[in-house]
Image (tube, rainbow, N blue to C red):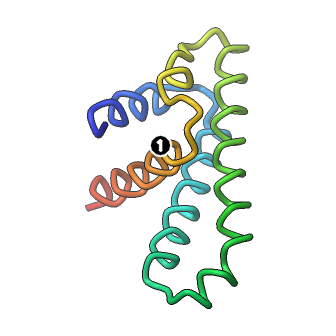
Amino acid sequence: MVDQFSEIFEEISDTTCIELKNELINLAIRYSRIRVDWKLSDTRQRLEMEDSRSRCHDAFIDSCNILSRNMEKSGEYTKWREKLGNDRKVIGDFACYIHYKIGIDAK
């Protein structure tokens, strides 16, 4: 899965839709942070954060779709969105991969 995420992220990184790409990255980082906080929380805290976690996840998925549509309008390669698929867990894992990749590259 990591190899596929790496390939998808490279395809996204090449876009000329810079603002939309940056929005996708920012949402990925926000969602992955919430996901870690959720993992480290107790049951009561998880219930309290569930709605915001789901909304952030939805926003990240929407961002993927918006970027893909705009890349297609610009004549850019968009098969990455098809490769990513529609499974919410996989898309959430991709958000975490982006956070990881940005963090590693920031050294």
Residue in the foreground of this view, choosing between 24 and 41: 41
Give residue 30's position: percent from left, percent from top.
57, 64
Q: Is residue 46 above or below residue 69?
A: below
User: In the image, what residue occupies the spot 45% across and 45% down?
Assistant: 94
Q: Is residue 36 left or right of residue 55?
A: left
Q: Nearer the viewer, residue 41 or 99?
A: 41
Q: Residues within 10 Å of mark 1 (few under 14, many from 20)?
A: some
Residue at position x 43%, y 83% in the image: 40
24 displayed left or right of 9: right
80 sits to left or right of 1: right
Residue 101 placed where, x, y %?
Answer: 34, 51
Q: Which of these two is toward me, 50 or 75?
A: 50
Q: Amino acid at mark 1?
A: Val
Give the residue displayed 73% in from the left and 14% down from the top: 73
**Quarter of the rendering containing residue 64:** top right
Q: Quadrant of the N terminus?
A: top left
Of 18 and 63, nearer the camera is: 63
SS assignment at label 1: helix
The residue pinned by badge 1 equals: 90
